[in-house]
Image (cartoon, grey):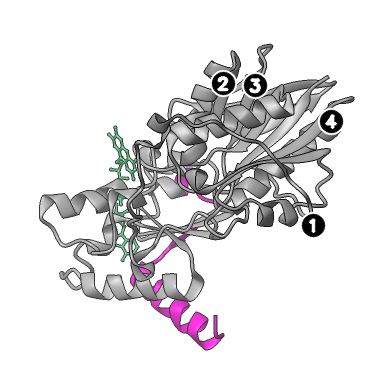
């Protein structure tokens, strides 16, 4: 009989982020599918009561919490100690947690301490005939493996965006406090602050329903023999502002900056999609001024509906990489699209 523990860390306000609610959806699914299993929820954070209340109606047999200022920020020593204590208190055999950077860093170590195993970046969980298996991609998202394990506890870290989020009403839940004896050495590392780009230049939005991709064509000489980079910047930023899409790029375009050529000022390598870039998950994608070569489109693996705008009717998008290719000038198309979006009050 498995004991399934949903393990989550809280946000600064004590609530659970979407990734944790998705992990809860997965944990609930597993506990429903595995007959005779029990289900427990455990939290780590400086304030955990809001989290317990947020998922009070999820059906957990009990709620456990390691709470305190020592557990506010991501820190290997304290996170690992808290997770270990929660797993022991729950008697967990299967631990399902969101694959956040905080947990990806510490939970494999906790699995080793407890004699278990961990799988990070899990994208799907199968529960056929009372057997549990997880899916994980390898070799830059080209090969998918289905794994099962006999060791316990088995830590399953589910990738954000890959699971359906649990939905249910909040309530009041009393979380049982689990105490952790921290040695002084666990407090050696301190977080002195958080640096992040200003909201105005924050162009990567993992939860956006549309991925908008820019290619090197935006900076190339156009029909009039001139490049139009300032105009391209405005069209792209206006579209992002109107739609709150996430911005992706081809490698050629982000590389241009390093080569001293005119480049869109808000792009960094973090925006790069593809074999040597990111593989984001968005329901839809729109590519502009990009050729759609394999090393780029491999990063679109999890984008369900794909459209592209390119002047080249023979580009990679036309060869089975996109559902719809508009053979057109992206400057004209995006100008008109922005006009229509602005008029409709998007
Ligand atoms: C080992 C390796 C790893 C790589 N990894 C990646 C990766 O992770 N991600 C990645 O993106 N690439 C990667 N590449 C590079 C990849 O092969 C391509 O070189 C790159 O994706 C090309 O970028 P692009 O399509 O933006 O540029 P280009 O090939 O220059 O294409 C520009 C396109 O814009 C079109 N265009 C120009 N003006 C307009 C206009 N006004 N309207 C509409 N269309 C217009 C042109 O017709 C052209 O099709 C990798 C390559 C290698 C060898």
Left or right? Give the position of 5 relative to 335: right
Disc 2 versus disc 1: nearer the observer: 1
Of the numbered discs 3 and 1, the one sitting upstream in the chain is 3
Q: Which residue is mark 2?
A: 111
Q: CA distance from mark 2 to mark 1?
A: 31 Å
Q: Nearer the viewer, residue 123 or 7?
A: 7
Residue 12's x, y, as percent? 52, 57
Judging from the image, what secondary structure is the residue with disc 2 in?
helix
Q: Nearer the viewer, residue 120 or 269?
A: 120
Q: Is mark 4 within 8 Å of ligand 1?
A: no
Mark 1 packing: few (<14 Cα in 10 Å), some, or many (20+)? some
Q: Which residues are magenta?
A: 318-346
Q: CA distance from mark 1 to mark 4?
A: 26 Å
In the rendered structure, are the residues bearing label 2 and label 3 in contact, judged by CB atoms less than 8 Å apart? Answer: yes
Residue 342's x, y, as percent? 49, 84
Q: Which residue is mark 1?
A: 172
Q: Is 319 colored magenta in this rendering?
A: yes
Left or right? Give the position of 130 relative to 126: right
Disc 4 versus disc 2: nearer the observer: 2
Of the numbered discs 1 and 4, the one sitting upstream in the chain is 4
Left or right? Give the position of 261 relative to 331: left
Q: Give the residue at x 43% y 70%.
A: 240
Q: CA distance from mark 3 to mark 1?
A: 30 Å
Mark 3 packing: few (<14 Cα in 10 Å), some, or many (20+)? many
Q: Give the residue at x 51% y 80%.
A: 341
Q: CA distance from mark 2 to mark 3?
A: 7 Å
Judging from the image, what secondary structure is the residue with disc 4 in?
helix
Q: Which residue is mark 4?
A: 33
The residue positioned farthest toward the bottom in the image shown: 343
Q: Which residue is mark 3?
A: 154
Q: Is mark 3 within 8 Å of ligand 1?
A: no
Q: Give the residue at x 33% y 61%.
A: 197
């Amino acid at each position: 009989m498995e004991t399934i523990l949903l393990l989550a860390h809280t946000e600064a306000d004590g609530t659970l982020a979407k990734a944790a609610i998705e992990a809860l959806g997965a944990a609930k699914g597993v506990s429903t599918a595995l007959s005779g299993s029990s289900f427990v929820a455990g939290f780590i954070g400086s304030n955990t009561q809001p989290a317990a209340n947020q998922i009070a109606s999820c059906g957990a047999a009990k709620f456990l919490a390691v709470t305190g200022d020592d557990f506010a920020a991501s820190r290997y020593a304290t996170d690992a100690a808290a997770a270990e204590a929660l797993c022991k208190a729950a008697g967990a055999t299967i631990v399902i947690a969101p694959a956040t950077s905080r947990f990806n860093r510490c939970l494999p170590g906790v699995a080793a301490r407890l004699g278990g195993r961990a799988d990070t970046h899990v994208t799907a969980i199968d529960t056929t005939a009372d057997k549990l298996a997880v899916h994980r991609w390898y070799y830059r998202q080209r090969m998918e493996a289905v794994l099962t394990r006999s060791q316990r506890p088995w830590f399953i870290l589910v990738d954000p965006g890959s699971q359906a989020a649990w939905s249910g009403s909040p309530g009041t839940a009393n979380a049982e406090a689990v105490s952790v004896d921290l040695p002084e050495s666990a407090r050696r590392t301190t977080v002195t602050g958080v640096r992040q780009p200003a909201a105005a230049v924050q162009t990567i939005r993992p939860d956006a329903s549309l991925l908008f991709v820019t290619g090197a064509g935006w900076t190339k000489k156009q029909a009039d023999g001139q490049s139009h980079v300032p105009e391209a910047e405005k069209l792209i930023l206006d579209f992002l502002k109107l739609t709150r899409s996430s911005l992706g790029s081809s490698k050629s375009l982000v590389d241009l900056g390093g080569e001293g050529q005119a480049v869109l000022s808000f792009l960094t390598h973090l925006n790069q999609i593809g074999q040597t870039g990111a593989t984001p998950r968005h329901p839809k994608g729109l590519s502009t001024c990009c050729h759609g070569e394999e090393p780029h489109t491999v990063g679109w693996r999890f984008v369900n509906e794909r459209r592209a705008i390119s002047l080249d009717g023979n580009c990679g998008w036309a060869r089975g990489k996109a559902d719809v290719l508009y053979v057109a000038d992206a400057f004209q198309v995006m100008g008109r699209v922005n006009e229509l979006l602005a008029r409709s009050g998007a």
